[in-house]
């Protein structure tokens, strides 16, 4: 009898029924999210991307909260740290920093990723980006010619010299100078471009990416592996330059002449778009006291491209090249083990 009275109590049902409907709605929503969520969200962690025809970019259309757990990369983090510690114990480098990021999910792992270095020739990438940003509005700027009179030669001081350089007494279109600067890392081409660039374009780029400006005096170590990766991400996502130019920039980076770095850690048939940088610290008598060697780029592992940035300092160039190559190989093998 008590149960019948309870069922006939209208006032009670006025409270119970809405609560039951609300609870059922929450349960169904969670169930639907887990089982019927679009595959795009599951794969890209809340990022919707344009699956266009350009092979080196994947434009970002929408970005949500990453649904994948950061803990997924704890085993990778441990392996990177073990590799770094081993290299340091063997005195192959004095400092090593590594930053790895899955470009589609946003998951990342790093060791000493916030340590500061001088980017050296990697500074050429923002110069290139600044010129191509201007070219979106004034495409004719790329055909503007600049004379190299031979008054300076900043390639002489480098250990890793460019295979091809601009020649004194010749004029070069800005587009061609950019190719010399990026593909061959020609310091003379970079100096000409820097001299003729409106530096407000660079300031705007650095401000938008919240990247610290190069110091005018004092300590030149100002950029970390993690922060530098932002240049790679805006190119891959086509969020700063338009899609056509982002693709062009990454094609130039994929032609870079530094096979002993990140490229050596991936199979020869895998595209790698990267830029290396070498800084020499000299004593008063001109002898080399220390070196910094870095390589940052995008490894286009099939269906799962990732950014990697390895920054190092030490005394022996061959050792530093070996550190970058070995860590790149470790990362590629781990990605391959996860997705193959």
Image (tube, rainbow, N blue to C red):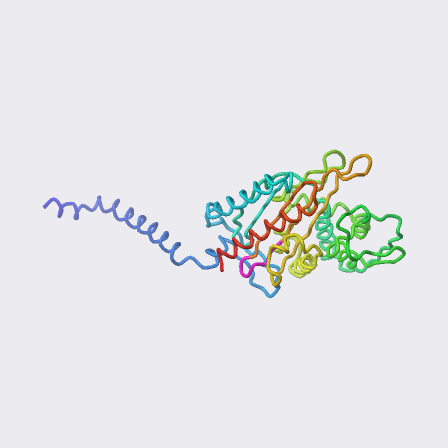
Q: Is residue 301 magenta?
A: yes
In the picture provided, is 289 more to the left or to the right than 35?
A: right
On the image, the x and y values in percent for residue 240 come to 65, 53
Q: Nearer the viewer, residue 57 or 116?
A: 116
> In the figure, residue 61 lies in which quadrant?
bottom right
Q: Residue at x 20, y 46 (%)?
A: 10
Q: Residue at x 60, y 50 (%)?
A: 326
Is 86 drawn above or below residue 271 in the view shown? Answer: above
**Magenta region:** 298-304
In the picture provided, is 64 more to the left or to the right than 26?
A: right
Is 176 drawn above or below residue 202 in the view shown? Answer: below
Q: Residue at x 75, y 42 (%)?
A: 280
Is 340 drawn above or below residue 220 in the view shown? Answer: below
> In the figure, residue 215 lies in which quadrant?
top right
Q: Nearer the viewer, residue 129 or 162?
A: 162
Secondary structure that dominates the magenta span: loop
Identify the residue at the far front of this view: 90
Identify the residue at the far bottom of this view: 53
Q: Residue at x 55, y 51 (%)?
A: 330
In the picture provided, is 152 more to the left or to the right than 304?
A: right
On the image, the x and y values in percent for residue 331 come to 55, 51
Q: Nearer the viewer, residue 328 or 37?
A: 328
Q: Count the marks.
A: 0
On the image, the x and y values in percent for residue 1 come to 9, 46
Q: Is residue 104 magenta?
A: no
On the image, the x and y values in percent for residue 239 come to 62, 53
> In the figure, residue 147 lies in which quadrant?
bottom right
Is 314 drawn above or below residue 237 in the view shown? Answer: above
Identify the residue at the far left of this view: 1
Q: Nearer the viewer, residue 34 or 267?
A: 267
């Amino acid at each position: 009898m008590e149960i019948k009275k309870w069922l006939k109590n209208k006032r009670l049902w006025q409270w119970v029924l809405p609560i039951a409907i609300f609870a059922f709605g929450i349960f169904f929503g969670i169930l639907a999210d887990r089982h019927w969520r679009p595959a795009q969200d599951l794969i890209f962690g809340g990022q919707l991307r344009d699956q266009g025809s350009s092979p080196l970019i994947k434009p970002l259309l929408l970005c949500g909260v990453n649904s994948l757990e950061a803990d997924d990369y704890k085993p990778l983090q441990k392996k990177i740290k073990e590799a770094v510690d081993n290299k340091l114990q063997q005195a192959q480098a004095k400092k090593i920093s590594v930053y790895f990021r899955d470009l589609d999910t946003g998951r990342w792992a790093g060791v000493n990723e916030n340590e500061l270095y001088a980017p050296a020739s990697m500074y050429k990438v923002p110069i290139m980006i600044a010129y191509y940003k201007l070219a979106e509005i004034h495409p004719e700027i790329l055909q503007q010619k600049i004379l190299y009179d031979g008054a300076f030669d900043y390639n002489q001081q480098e250990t890793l010299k460019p295979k091809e350089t601009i020649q004194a007494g010749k004029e070069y279109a800005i587009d061609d100078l950019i190719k010399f600067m990026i593909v061959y890392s020609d310091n003379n081409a970079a100096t000409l471009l820097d001299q003729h660039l409106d530096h407000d374009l660079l300031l705007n780029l650095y401000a938008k990416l919240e990247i610290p400006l190069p110091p005018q005096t004092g300590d030149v170590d100002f950029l970390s592996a993690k922060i530098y990766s932002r240049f790679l991400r805006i190119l891959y996502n086509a969020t700063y330059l338009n899609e056509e130019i982002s693709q062009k920039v990454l094609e130039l980076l994929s032609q870079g002449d530094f096979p002993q770095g990140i490229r050596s850690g991936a199979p020869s048939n895998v595209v790698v778009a990267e830029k290396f940088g070498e800084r020499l610290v000299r004593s008063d008598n001109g002898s080399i006291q220390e070196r910094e060697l870095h390589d940052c780029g995008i490894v286009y592992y099939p269906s799962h491209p990732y950014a990697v940035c390895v920054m190092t300092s030490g005394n022996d160039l061959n050792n530093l090249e070996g550190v970058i190559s070995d860590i790149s190989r470790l990362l590629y093998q781990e990605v391959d083990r996860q997705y193959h």
